[in-house]
Amino acid sequence: MSQAPAMRIFGLAGWSGSGKTTLLARLLPELTSRGLSVSTLKHAHHAFDLDQPGKDSWRHRAAGASEVMISSVNRWALIHEHRGAPETRFDELVRRMTPVDLLLVEGFKDVPFAKLEVHRAALGKPLLCRDNPHIVAVASDAPLSGVGVPVLALDDVAQIARFILAACRLEAA
């Protein structure tokens, strides 16, 4: 019996305001239109809440539930409260994901997997690729010189998608 191929993981890294989320939202239809199943995992550096205060699930969490699952005919979501425990490790988060062809990760810049740096010259921030060996290319809105990895045009989503597929050794269906 043959085993399903392993889920590929590829990341987007960059400074706040560089356009990581915008690029990710543009990449998803480009990749899924090629017949690939794609999921995303985003790291937040701050407290966030998916729940609305006063709703039943929010009240469950506020009352002390460790996990609250919300389900409907359209979707389900699981909210896990750390309750003082350390942040869940990246590999454990990935294990909780349903396997797909490609998992696109926003953030987790120090975790060792291939990443594309999203760079906007107007932010005036230094390139992360100079100090991060896991960055395999840069998508920039301006020409860059002296960069030791490929530089892609930030607005050329098709080219970026092709690069990610090649880097992950994935073929469109």
Image: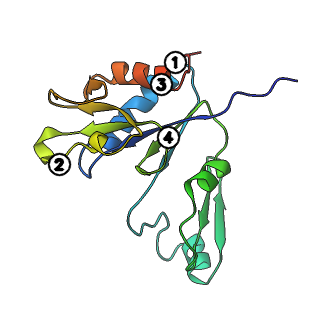
Amino acid at pointer 4: Phe
Name the N-terminal-most of marks 4 and 1.
Answer: 1
Q: Which of 125 and 146 lies nearest the eye of the viewer? A: 146
The CA span between labels 3 and 2 is 26 Å
- Report the residue marked by disc 4: 113
The CA span between labels 2 and 4 is 22 Å
Name the N-terminal-most of marks 3 and 2.
Answer: 2
Q: Tell me where residue 106 appears, x and y as whole percent.
A: 42, 46
Q: Quadrant of the N terminus?
A: top right
Judging from the image, the colouring scheme is rainbow
Residues tagged 3 and 1 counted as in contact (Cβ below 8 A)? no
**In this rendering, position of residue 129 left or right of residue 38:** left
Q: Tell me where residue 120 appears, x and y as whole percent.
A: 19, 39
- Report the residue marked by disc 1: 34
Q: What secondary structure is found at the residue carrying circle 4?
A: loop
Mark 2 packing: few (<14 Cα in 10 Å), some, or many (20+)? few
- Number of the label disc, if any, that sits on residue 167: 3
